[in-house]
Image: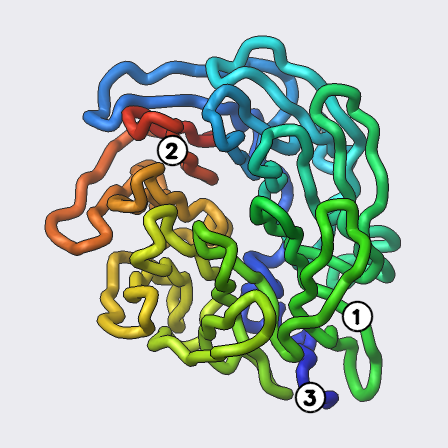
Amino acid sequence: MIRGSVAVFALLVLATGGSGAVARSAASNSDIYSIALDGTDLRRLTETPDSEEYLSRSADGTRLAYYATKDGRTWSVYVSNADGTERRRLAPHSRTVDFREPPAWSLDGRQLAYAQGFGCGDVICNRQEVWTTDVMSGKSRRLAKSAVQPAWSATRLAYTRARLIIVREPSYRLNVVLARPDGSRPRVVVRGGEGASWSPSGRFLAYRGFDGYGPSGVFRIRNDGAQRRRLRSPFDPTVVSWSPNRRHIAIVGGTLPTVYVVRANGRGLRTFGRIDLESEHALSWSPDGRRLAWPRGKRILVRAAAGGPRRELAVGKEILHVVWSADGRRLFFVAA
């Protein structure tokens, strides 16, 4: 196996993709809701024939973005106001099989970036690309070929270059790339890495490192490729998310998917609790970076980054994705 790649058959055995769970069918009649942090004032924001998934919020808190489908096969990118009104279809979306994440908002709220897969079977896609869509006009364009996992900073876009190779079995060669927001001047900053998460300042990236056999750990690196540091992390990390206050990094990993939190200096790894396999990308930091929320069955779990008791919000529905409101008083979530 080529170094810096990851075998697709291993992803299926472990039931985790390059950035999350193996493909599953859309939840039946899943909708978007919001709830107050004390568990009161549950609101249903969408009630359509569509099933919504993979929710994200604009930085200013005024809008939501998500994917929706009627038949589980034909998907589109949608946006709405934070209260669910003015729902609008932006662009068609061709989902990838093994790299699924919510649409990524640019910090100015003008663009969405997301991965698309083409020629996809049950296991792999022949082609994967990062696309962007202008939120006002709906105009879409391909930003990068052989690319997934887009993530914005104020001045750059990071993504994973995932090149499909076949030696003894299908594999991906994974590298972290930085480019200008328009996709120009791409530059590899990490060879054998994926799933980059920006520090709030945009000076550093946290990412999952790979050797020739799979995940080798979580690392932090400066945006010019210098000062690489290995962080304490669980076995088989699958998701990395930097807190908005820069102090902590959340990680999903372990034999059974579990949420961990480590300080940004790489020390003090703590276990926070189990997370549902299909919801690994539902980790959500509060706007002040002091609390973390994630779904577990029909509950939303909330815990302070510094530790302490865990709050549980029971909603009576299977929760798929969770996102904080911009003021930190409510949680948006997708549930079926």
123 relative position to 273: left or right: right
Colour logic: rainbow
78 relative position to 326: left or right: right
User: At label 3, which amino acid type do we have?
Assistant: Arg
Where is residue 330 drawn, in percent x and y?
A: 32, 25
Please state, as top left, top right, bottom left or bottom right, where the N terminus lies in the image. bottom right
Residue 272 occupies which quadrant of the picture?
Answer: bottom left
49 lies above or below 197: above
| Mark 2 closeness class: few <14, some 14–19, many ≥20 residues within 10 Å | many
| 8 and 198: which is toward the camera | 198
Residue 307 occupies which quadrant of the picture?
Answer: bottom left
Where is residue 157 drawn, in percent x and y?
A: 66, 52
Residue at 82% across / 34% down in the picture? 140
Pointer 3 residue: 3
How far, Cα to Cα, is label 1 from label 2? 34 Å
Regarding mark 2 in the picture, which secondary structure is present there? Answer: strand
Pointer 2 residue: 324
Q: Answer with mark 3 or mark 2, whichever residue precedes in sequence.
A: 3
63 lies above or below 94: above
Where is residue 67 drawn, in percent x and y?
A: 65, 33
Regarding mark 1 in the picture, which secondary structure is present there? Answer: strand
User: At label 1, which amino acid type do we have?
Assistant: Arg
Pointer 1 residue: 163
Q: Are marks 1 and 3 in contact (CB under 8 Å)?
A: no
| 71 and 158: which is toward the camera | 158
| 280 and 330: which is toward the camera | 330
Mark linked to residue 148? none
